Amino acid sequence: MDSAKLSLRGVTYYDPSKAYDGYTLFAPLADFFVWLIDMQGRIVHCWKMPYTPGQQGVLLPNGNVLYLGRSETQKGPEKELGGYSGKLIEVDWDGNVLWEYENDYIHHDFCRRANGNTFIIRWYGMMPEDVEVKIKGGVPPSAHVGTRWGAPGEMWATAIQEIRSDGTVVWEWKDYEHLDPEADIIGPLDWRSEWMHCNSIEELPDGNLLISARSLSSIYIINKTTGDVEWRWGPGEIAHQHDATLVENGNILCLDNGMGRLGSEISYSRALEVNPQTNRIEWEYKDNPPTDFYSGIQSGCQRLPNSNTLITEACRGRIFEVTPDGEIAWEFVSPFYGYYMAPGWWNVIYKAYRYGPDYDGLQGKILDPKKFDWISRSYGLHRMHTQ
């Protein structure tokens, strides 16, 4: 291995024979930019946003970017709950804002439907008292003296809403109407400031919804017609997970963060695939030793068309691709640092996405790394190692 080609930033490993060729999109949480890089880590396009990311941006099939931005003018206790955003915008390839939805209570994730409507996650006022008293678990209220983090009467409810382009709500689901206080128990490390801390949402082919609730260490399938919970899984198996998605074989892929994992003396993360028919874990990736891959917060994973999995290790600003056998095929460490939350100067990334060259949103677009070469070189992105 040629040490002159190694860098602690940018692409640190790439095996073209095993990696899924394409372009990787990510939005550093301490930056105003969304970056699109090629397999060598070179910037091929970028968007400067009017807001720092609340969490992430995605490239739509029409070539626009749908982006959840953080409102710095947001006020109120919801700003302390984590994942707050406030601004959902759609920008074109040149960064022009085409659509904006503003709501101080939206957070974490969104899902654009084929009909142009959008699913959002939001806080929905205070939990009804008759429900709150039945909810079990969480850090005892006595630990919250002098704060608004879950004192009695101050637990936030969660809603999932489907909105039209004009912001009209056409469908709504509320946690306190459908979750079960006996089954959906807040974890021992989580504040009683909210019941779910919902952090991902995906529409399934049958129209139902797949969601992840971090505070409950649970994944759910919600019947869109009735609102009923059709499937729940997680407690005792996963801990503070993120990014539940459906894969082609019908299994559910998620990023198991592992903070406070039951029965483990160490903290480690893993990507796993669970069969919702049997509740059996049929595939997982974790490092050896396990602690070499760990992000207690945020993060995600994406199943790629070649059966590899793209994983975002948020707290290390690391994006890497693994084969079904767990072999690393590509690895990138973000050089984009900025001030973000308690750690201060940080290169954290909530989640990254890989798009193949044939993706509809990239057709007809100019992806020329020479245009951004001066940026790539200034961050050391021209240095990499190829297998």
Image (cartoon, helix red, strand yellow):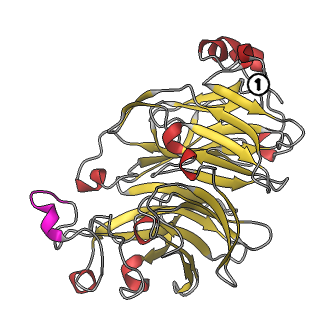
How many C-alpha atoms fall within 10 Å of the one at disc 1: few (<14), some, or many (≥20)? many
Q: Please state the total of marks drawn on the protein image.
A: 1
Helix or strand or loop: what does disc 1 sit on?
loop
**Residue 14 on image: x %, y %:** 78, 33
- Magenta residues span 141-148
> Quadrant of the rendered structure where residue 356 is?
top right
**Residue 293 on image: x %, y %:** 57, 47
Q: Is residue 323 above or below residue 342?
A: below
**Residue 334 on image: x %, y %:** 58, 30
Using the image as rendered, state which of residue 207 and residue 156 is in the foreground: 156
Q: Which residue was labeled with disc 1?
A: 385
Q: Is residue 144 rendered magenta in the image? A: yes
Using the image as rendered, state which of residue 55 and residue 334 is in the foreground: 334
Q: Quadrant of the C terminus?
A: top right
**Residue 193 on image: x %, y %:** 27, 65
Q: Is residue 212 rendered magenta in the image? A: no
Using the image as rendered, state which of residue 264 and residue 234 is in the foreground: 264
Is 346 situated left or right of 384 in this image?
Answer: left
Residue at (44%, 58%) from the top-left corner? 259
